[in-house]
Amino acid sequence: MKNANFTDELSMLVKVLNKVHQTNEQIIKSILEIKAQETAPVSVLHDLIFIEELSEKLRISTSTIYRYVSEGIIPCSRIGNRHVFFESDIKRFLKENYRSNQIKNNKQP
C-alpha cells in the first residue's frame, strides 16, 4: 500500500514539475518574441541584458563587468541579486569610448 501511495505522489509531482517547466518555456518564448519585434516600440524587455549575456557579447569576464559597475563606468540596475543593463546604455558607453587610431604613413620622399 505504501508503494502505491509513493507512486501516486511521485506521479503527481512529475505532472506538477512538467506544468512548471511548460509555463517557464512559454514565458521564455514570450520574452524572445517581444525582443525579436523590430517594429515594436522599445520596451524594457527588448532592451534588457543580464550580466552573463553582456560578458559574452563584450568577450570580457563578469568580474571585469562587476568592477566597471562598482567604479561607475557602466550603468546598471539590480533586480533582486542580479545586475541588469539596458542595451542602449551599453551601446552609448561603447560609442562614447570608441577611439580610432590613425596609422601614420612613414614613407620617405
Image (cartoon, grey):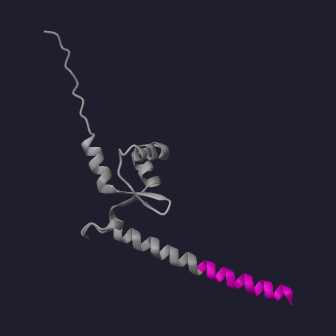
Residue that sits furthest to the right in the current view: 1
Is 19 on the left or on the right of 60, as rendered? right
**Residue that appears at 24% across and 33% down:** 100
Q: Which residues are magenta?
A: 1-18
The image quadrant of residue 22 is bottom right
Up the image or down, 4 lies above or below 39; here it is below
The image quadrant of residue 83 is bottom left
**Residue that appears at 46% across and 74% down:** 27
Q: How many marks?
A: 0
Question: How far from the left and from the top, in percent, is residue 95?
Answer: 25, 45
**Residue that appears at 84% across and 85% down:** 3
Along the line of sight, which residue is nearer the eye, 29 or 51? 51
Question: How far from the left and from the top, in percent, is residue 24?
Answer: 51, 74
12 part of magenta stretch: yes
Quadrant where the C terminus lies?
top left
Is 94 on the left or on the right of 54, as rendered? left
Question: How far from the left and from the top, in percent, is residue 43?
Answer: 30, 68
Residue that sits furthest to the left in the current view: 109
15 part of magenta stretch: yes
Along the line of sight, which residue is nearer the eye, 40 or 50? 50
The image quadrant of residue 38 is bottom left
Up the image or down, 79 lies above or below 89; here it is below
Is 58 on the left or on the right of 5, as rendered? left
**Residue that appears at 35% across and 44% down:** 73
Residue that sits furthest to the front in the current view: 71
Quadrant where the N terminus lies?
bottom right
Q: Is most of the magenta stretch helix, strand or loop?
A: helix
